[in-house]
Image (tube, rainbow, N blue to C red):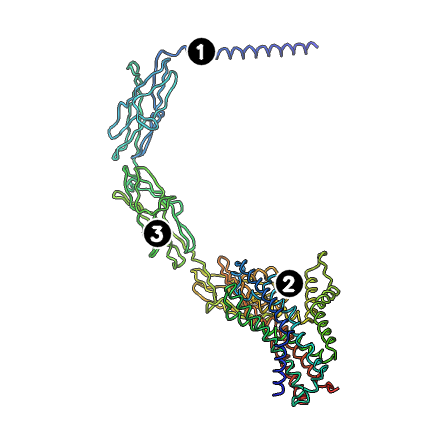
Amino acid sequence: MMRIKRDGFCLFAFTVFVAVSVFLIFSGTSASEETKKIKLPERGISVAPEYTGVIVSQDEDVSIDLIVTNRGRRDENIDLTVTSIPKGWKAWVKTYSFGITGVHVESDKSKNLTLRAEPDEDLAPGKYKFGIEAKTADGKLTSKSQLIITVKEKKKEKKAKGINIITSYPVLRGPTDAKFEFSLEVENKLDKDSIFNLTFQGPENWDINFKPAYEDKYISSLRLKSGQSQTVAVEVKPYPFEKPDEYPILVKVSSPEAVGEVKLTVALTGTYKLDAGTANGLLSLNAIRGKKANLSVYVKNSGSGTLTNLQFLSFKPENWKTEFIPEKIDTLPPGELKQVEVSITPRDEALVGDYSVGLTAEAGKVSKTLELRVTVKASTAWGWIGIGIIVLVMAGLVFLFIRFGRR
Amino acid sequence: MSGLFAVFKKELCDHFSSYRFVILFALIAMVSFITSYMAGIHMKENLEALAKTRFPFLMLFSSPGALFSMIQFVAFFGPLIGLILGFDSINRERAQGTLVKLVSQPIYRDAVINGKFLAGVATISVLLTSIVLVISGFGLALVGVVPGIEEIWRLLVYLLISIFYISFWLGISILFSIFFKGIATSALASVALWIFLSFFISLGAEVAANAVAPADSQNQTKPEIIVKNMRIKETVSLISPMVLYSKATEIIIDPMRKTTGSIIMMGPMEELLSSRFQNPLTLGQSMIVVFPHMTALIAITLICFAISYLVFLKQEIRT
């Protein structure tokens, strides 16, 4: 009993302790915030770059955030100057869009500006010190800071090139009758604007053109600002009778100052084209119902790839029969012609008249359909039997005339 | 031969001068005109249909004007011409006693029947040809379409079949006039036979077809059974010369018709592919389709004449 009571007391004491300490912590922080506000000096500014030292390669521009802070209780207009600019550099303070000489900063706030430094072309590697000075409008307060840019030597050949050409897909593959389109990204690495001529070296008789990306006009030169890059499409139409192979195309982008080259490759797989027809071009056929009618059809591979597994199908009325000899052709090399004998048998009870019968030659990727007009005719056999009957009756009549006449 | 010619000439004279013939001709000509006039008006109103067909001229004969087309009219009432021309040809001569006088002349007995039959055929030919020509002229004036060679040939074949068809009925009536002594009896007998063959056979055919393959329109009957039913009906009704004649002429006059059957079984592919080219049949093909019908018509006409010839020559005529 006693023991439990003491435990209860302990718990109570602990709770009180926690409550008091929490209260103390809270009141303490609020007190310190208030004192800070009060502690702010009447006036105070500072300026500092985000990074005080950067390393860049030659020819590279530097943009660094510049933080201007007002520590005082008053809002300030602060003038900014770049006090020391090393030889061979240009430097200025700017916002995202324009250069500035001063900025307004509210009390206890800071502003981010940009310090932009551009080196000359032939700048030697080394350390360069930039001084930045901030001064209130009335000139009473100043703040200074410095930035050190270390310039490293750049690789020589990249510098010499001046043009950067990037292509994601340098090899395209497709049939001969397709249109290939390469996408090149041309970047002007020169320090000045320039006009670049676009030229190519490709297989003979090919149709190669340059187009701006997503635009439907042909271009032969391109104007790029310094540092700008643009996508150029190279449209390639192969010569229709080219053999399946790989064909390199050398694309040259040149300006008086620099030349860039890129090798594109078109891999042709050949075209698949099938022609079919009859020797005399007639697509009509006479058939007597129930009797076979024959027709010679040729199939020709007029593409540049070999056709394999050539099959024949027919689209015909029910109960009609079509036969192909041969039933299929295993391989048909380009330019080759083969003859197929087709026999069509109309149904016994088919009506006389014209029917459409479709013959299709199919080789996987390609197919060719011939529509035939099949004129079904009735057999004349019954006609002759009918004439026979009439002749028989006439003969009987003549017999009667001779036998019984003249009485 | 001179005897045959004399009888032929006299009979022809009699036919063309008789009131009976004039009235009959006037009636038939009038009905034919009206029919084809209606057809012409109908064609004028439906010029799209006229543009679709490749043989507009034949439509004058085949398209129904008011109630029936020209060819249907000839099929129904053409037999009457034959019957009226022949029902009293022999027994009237016999009743009036002129037959004995006739054969006492230097005229052979076969010349009498041959001459009478030929005169009837000649009359029928003149009648039908003139009707067809008048309708053609009428059509030229009314519709303004000129018949092509193919259409003229089809009309000629049509004319030939029609002459044989009516001649068959002429032969029947001559046969009855030989069989029966009374004029009224032979007239009645031939009209009865005409009515039976033309109107009752179709009823009989239906009864026969329903007995063999009952096809009820209410029940869902299999298409095979319906086709069988139709086939039996059509086969049985072929006994009627009228059916033979109408089937033959409708194929000859309408080049787009490909079969005499009214119902045919066709798969969907067959239907699709046969409707791909809407070409008319050539005259030769049309004729082959109805060759059995044409043969049968010509044969029964000749057989009918042969029987009357035989009976007449074997008959005792002097009493």
Give the residue at mark 1: A34
Task: List x then y, in percent, for residue B258.
Answer: 59, 66
Q: Do pointers 1 and 3 mark residues of a single chain?
A: yes
* Vertical order, B234 against A264 (above or below): below
Task: List x then y, in percent, for residue B36.
Answer: 57, 65
Circle number at residue B265 = 2
Query: Tag 3: residue type?
Result: Ile
Which quadrant of the view contains residue A392?
Answer: bottom right
* Vertical order, B259 against A4 (above or below): below
Q: Give the distance between the C-alpha atoms of the residues marked 1 and 3, in whole angstroms.
A: 75 Å
Out of B190 and A375, give the one closest to the viewer.
Answer: B190
Helix or strand or loop: what does disc 3 sit on? strand
Task: List x then y, in percent, for residue A262.
Answer: 34, 47
Indicate left or right for A197 with A213 as reference.
left
Q: Chain of mark 2?
A: B
Which quadrant of the view contains residue A157?
Answer: top left
Task: List x then y, in percent, for residue A153.
Answer: 29, 35
Out of A350 and B138, give the one closest to the viewer.
Answer: B138
Quarter in which the N terminus of chain B is drawn: bottom right
Circle number at residue A364 = none
The reply to whether the C-beta atoms of the residues labelled 1 and 3 are less than 8 Å apart is no
Give the residue at mark 3: A208
The reply to whether the C-beta atoms of the residues labelled 2 and 1 are less than 8 Å apart is no
Tell which tag, 3 or 2, sits nearer the viewer. Answer: 2
Out of B126 and B6, give the one closest to the viewer.
Answer: B6
Query: Tag 1: residue type?
Result: Glu
Q: Give the distance between the C-alpha atoms of the residues marked 2 and 1, in whole angstroms.
A: 104 Å
Helix or strand or loop: what does disc 2 sit on? loop
Quarter in which the C terminus of chain B is drawn: bottom right
Out of B277 and A164, give the one closest to the viewer.
Answer: B277
